[in-house]
Amino acid sequence: MSSSDNFGLVPRIINASIAGIVGVTCVFPLDLAKTRWQNTAGANNLYKSYFDCFIKTFKNEGIRGMYKGSGVNLLLITPEKAIKLVANDGFRFLLKSKDGSLPMYKQILAGASAGMCQIVVTTPMELLKIAQQDSGRVVAMSHTSSSSSSKSATKLALDLLKKKGISGLYQGGTATLVRDVSFSAMYFPLFAYINSMGDIDPETKKPPFYHTFGSGILAGSIASYIATPLDVIKTRIQTTTKAPGDLQYNGVIESFFKILKHESPAALFKGAVARVCVVAPLFGIAQMFYFLGVAETIMGLKAIQPT
């Protein structure tokens, strides 16, 4: 394989890891409010809106409370984003035709495959994150002390392993798979198309970083909004600690019809704006740092070309 065909695996992994950490740090408070708002069903109207949820959480729990669950997220976001971003590039690299072209169906296949690969890390990460993020809502609904409902990620993981074994950490795995495959199949081809429309630098063969940032935001906004019903279902299934009046959600199909029965079709898009507010900047920031090529600068390598 010639040097021009070198995929550059290590720099891509480093770039993806940096991108994930920076992105999550910036948007985590928005994600916490999204989780609590999506878990607020009909009768349990603790919050009037996503923004009301954000303001009340900040008022009652402070900046520290806005980062509940961030520890496990920051720990696992490195392998999660490395798998997602690098796998998409890898599949695009492998699926390219001899003339270097990549038809749209292959771009969709590459994105969907990347989404499928990441669930090994994403499922337990989000399960533990949601439990910690939602603890404040559960405390408020149960009128109990925060110490009785708030557990560390390690304690939560050990409890699940003790009760259900390794499968306990993969509760909601099917829902996570459906959401992430659908999102990635839409997001990555759309991002690549929008990003390719920028003015390409003749030296780096990349568009300006601000164009990549905007491309990530736009593609993330569209894909995250469309995938919101799947995210609502996944969040309900993965909420392990219930407040009084909360329903139990199990499979994807059962949860879909239960939401329709007890709430309304609009409930499937609950938190759509919140999800866009989280995912759009997250992927804008992540793609920008991924494409900036920090690893190449640190390692003294030539800039890696987009796949």
Image: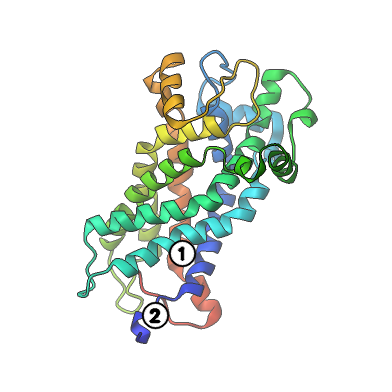
Query: Up-down: is 214 above or below 164?
Result: below
Few, some or many C-alpha atoms within 10 Å of disc 2 (few <14, some 14-19, many ≥20)?
few
In the rendering, which numbered label is found on residue 290?
1
* Residue 287 in the image, given as x and y percentages of width and height: 43, 59
What amino acid type should be assigned to the residue bearing mark 2?
Asn
Residue at the spot of label 2: 6
Query: Up-down: is 60 above or below 116?
Result: above
Classify residue 211 as left or right of residue 34: left
* Residue 221 in the image, given as x and y percentages of width and height: 38, 43
In the rendering, which numbered label is found on residue 303?
none
Q: Is residue 21 visible?
A: no
Residue occupying image coordinates x 34% and y 58%: 110
Classify residue 259 as left or right of residue 187: right
* Residue 190 in the image, given as x and y percentages of width and height: 30, 52
Residue occupying image coordinates x 35% and y 37%: 226
**Gap between marks 2 and 1 measured at Cα:** 17 Å
